[in-house]
Amino acid sequence: MTTRILGTGSAIPDRVVNNQELETFLDTSDTWIQERTGIQSRHTATTETTTSLAVKACMQALEDAGKTPEEVDLILAATVSPDYTFPCLACEIQSALGAKQAAAYDINAACAGFLFALDSAAAYIQCGLYKNALIVGAEVLTKLLNWEDRSTCILFGDGAGAAFVAEEKTGVLAMMQGANGQKGMALYRQETAPDTPFRKTGIRGGAAVNYLEMSGQDVFRFAISQVPESIQQILEKTGWDKKEVDYYILHQANARIIQSIAKRLDEPEDKFPMNLTQFGNMSSASIPVLLDEMNKSGRLKRGDKIVLSGFGAGMTYGATTLVW
Ligand code: COA
């Protein structure tokens, strides 16, 4: 037995910010952003929160799978932008859904978070501890961005995507995860450490905000070398030839990264669906939102052979093969 995705859901904030709107307050242009990233617009939270987006996506995933909250054994929430450091997002979801039986905790693997949540759920199910799980990637990254830094704020958007997974005869076939902590400072957000009576940091509690910082080229280089390698490894582990794969569903960071990975794998670009044009990089939400879109539009068919692959701050990376 293995673990299969039986339902999906997603939630995106209403407010759309296109590149032209960014031109009004940043020294940037629609042409530059599209040429370097493929992104045309992103959605940003105004009234929505990480929790409200996650709960909406989870409710949809349960409905799609025909399940009730009471039936859920485990909730795993992947996020780097929760509303609270504690209680964790997964516990907030458990409370909002009334999923009283479910164990719940968060995973921080940045943009690879949803993939790591899926792998963790599959491992629990495989070892017999749980029969099913509700997994979600949810982010309001726009609150962590410096809106005066044109090299980072143009890239990201907010959203949430969820999946209900359960024990089945087919589904997840192989998983691989990794991390390269030595490259961690390529993409980070430092926590604020205010003055205490015993340690002087020069930061007064309350007001200080630290933003996301990134060395774009280092992240780019990491992605285009590590992701193809991860995919080659997972194909070998699964025993699939790349020609058998129907879709490579990758973390949606940048169209140029995805195109470069397709080229390195010598696979046609139309096997690499993208939604970053519309939503930007939604970190842990990007893969599940794309899965939901493809599921609900009928583009994914039961039996399709899929490779999921992600990378993110950490630097974390991973790949999973599954039969839809
Ligand atoms: N508009 C216009 N110019 C911009 C700009 C913007 N939004 N952002 C940066 N620039 C400028 C830079 O200041 C620089 O100018 P200079 O040459 O005068 O110094 C020039 O464009 C080139 O900057 P560079 O950083 O070399 O661009 P790049 O080709 O590497 O593209 C990224 C930048 C961020 C788009 C690219 O590095 C990238 O996508 N990296 C991966 C990031 C990512 O995916 N992160 C999330 C991982 S989960």
Image (cartoon, rainbow, N blue to C red):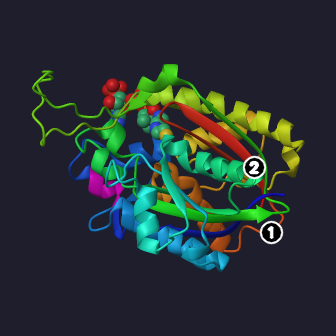
From the image, tell me which residue sits under label 1.
302
Q: Residue 81 appears at what percent x and percent y?
A: 37, 49
Q: Is residue 195 above or below residue 38?
A: above
Quarter of image, res 208: top left
Q: Is residue 209 magenta?
A: no
Ligand 1 - quadrant of the structure image: top left
| Amino acid type indicated by mark 1 | Arg
Give the mark nearest the N terminus, 2 or 1. Answer: 2
Q: Nearer the viewer, residue 233 or 133?
A: 133
Name the residue at 9% across, 33% down. Answer: 204
Q: Secondary structure at mark 1?
A: loop
Q: Residue 39 appears at what percent x and percent y?
A: 46, 51
Name the residue at 22% across, 41% down. Answer: 148
| Amino acid type indicated by mark 2 | Cys
Q: Residues within 10 Å of mark 2 (few under 14, many from 20)?
A: few
- In the shown orientation, is residue 203 left or right of residue 271? left
Q: Is residue 268 above or below residue 298?
A: above
Task: Residue 306: tell me if it is visible.
Answer: no
From the image, tell me which residue sits under label 2.
127
Magenta range is 17-22
- In the shown orientation, is residue 197 left or right of residue 274? left
